[in-house]
Image: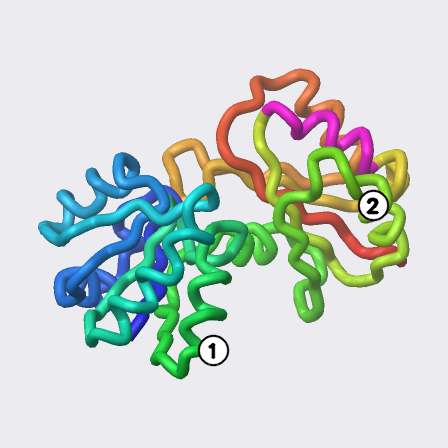
């Protein structure tokens, strides 16, 4: 069995009892960054073999992991935070495991975009998750396409690009488009800023930009 196990995006209390049990029972844990995962595993008393599985080695590692699974090993995949394969490594391994007829199970648990969407106050009956936009190639094409999107849109963004992204959204969506930005979800300094794109731009021009960001933008009216 290949288990995809969500880990907390901030608050360690968001780790589920089931996730802890699975990580204690498996033969091997695949971690996006073993250094990041080490404190989490130690906190919950999980002492297992941990191998690195990230975007730079996942293509090469998949064949060996599939071999381990075929030999009967129970393997868990975790990312640095949140649910594996959501803007993190995991998709390639899941696809190959399914192709080989192996059992795959994703546990429910923490992921950043769901609380950000609900906190935004924007329509959430229908939405589209875009994750990280292309940094360069294809970015403008994607934004032109999304300018016509009628559903609430959800993006992930890094602190050093947040202002630039707001400015681009204003260019393609209009400064009056309603939006919300959540940062540091489940952590001590969690906050959600709501308003038009113009309001958000003004806010982040006047305040320190720190943390991990989830950006929700209303669809075209």
Q: Quadrant of the C terminus?
A: bottom right
Q: Residue furthest bottom?
A: 101
Q: Please state the horizontal and vertical placement of residue 89, each as a whole percent of the image.
A: 46, 52
Position of 138 compared to 9: left or right? right
Q: Please state the horizontal and vertical placement of residue 26, each as a whole percent of the image.
A: 17, 65
Q: Residues within 10 Å of mark 2 (few under 14, many from 20)?
A: some
Which residue is tagged 1? 99
Residue shown at 13% from the left, 61% from the top:
24
**CA distance separating discs 2 and 1:** 34 Å
Position of 215 compared to 69: left or right? right
- Helix, strand or loop at disc 1? helix
Which residue is tagged 2? 143
Closest to the observer, 56 or 135: 56
Way the structure is coloured? rainbow
Residue shown at 42% from the left, 57% from the top:
83
Residue shown at 34% from the left, 80% from the top:
103
Q: Residues within 10 Å of mark 1 (few under 14, many from 20)?
A: few
Q: Quadrant of the N terminus?
A: bottom left
User: Range of the magenta residues?
Assistant: 160-169
Closest to the observer, 187 or 66: 66
Q: Please state the horizontal and vertical placement of residue 207, each as a whole percent of the image.
A: 61, 18
Q: Is residue 101 above or below residue 62?
A: below
Q: Is residue 180 above or below residue 66?
A: above
Residue shown at 52% from the left, 25% from the top:
210
- Magenta segment: does it hold 167? yes
- Magenta segment: does it hold 124? no
């Amino acid at each position: 069995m290949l288990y995809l196990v969500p880990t907390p995006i901030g608050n360690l209390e968001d780790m589920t009892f089931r996730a802890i049990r699975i990580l204690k029972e498996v033969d091997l844990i695949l971690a996006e960054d073993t250094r990041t995962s080490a404190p989490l595993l130690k906190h919950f008393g999980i002492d297992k073999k941990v191998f690195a599985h990230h975007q730079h080695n996942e293509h090469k590692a998949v064949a060996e992991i599939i071999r381990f699974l075929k030999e009967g090993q129970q393997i868990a995949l975790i990312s640095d935070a949140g649910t594996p394969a959501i803007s993190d490594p995991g998709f390639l391994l899941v696809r190959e495991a399914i192709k080989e007829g192996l059992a795959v199970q994703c546990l429910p648990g923490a992921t950043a975009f769901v609380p950000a969407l609900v906190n935004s106050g924007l329509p959430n009956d229908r939405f589209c998750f875009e994750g990280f936009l292309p940094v360069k190639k294809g970015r403008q094409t994607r934004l032109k396409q999304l300018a016509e999107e009628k559903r609430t849109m959800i993006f992930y963004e890094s602190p050093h690009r947040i202002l630039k992204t707001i400015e681009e959204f204003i260019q393609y969506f209009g400064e009056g488009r309603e939006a919300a930005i959540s940062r540091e979800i489940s952590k001590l300094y969690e906050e959600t800023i709501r308003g038009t794109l113009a309001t958000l731009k003004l806010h982040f021009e006047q305040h320190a930009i720190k943390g991990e960001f989830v950006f929700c933008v209303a669809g075209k009216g």
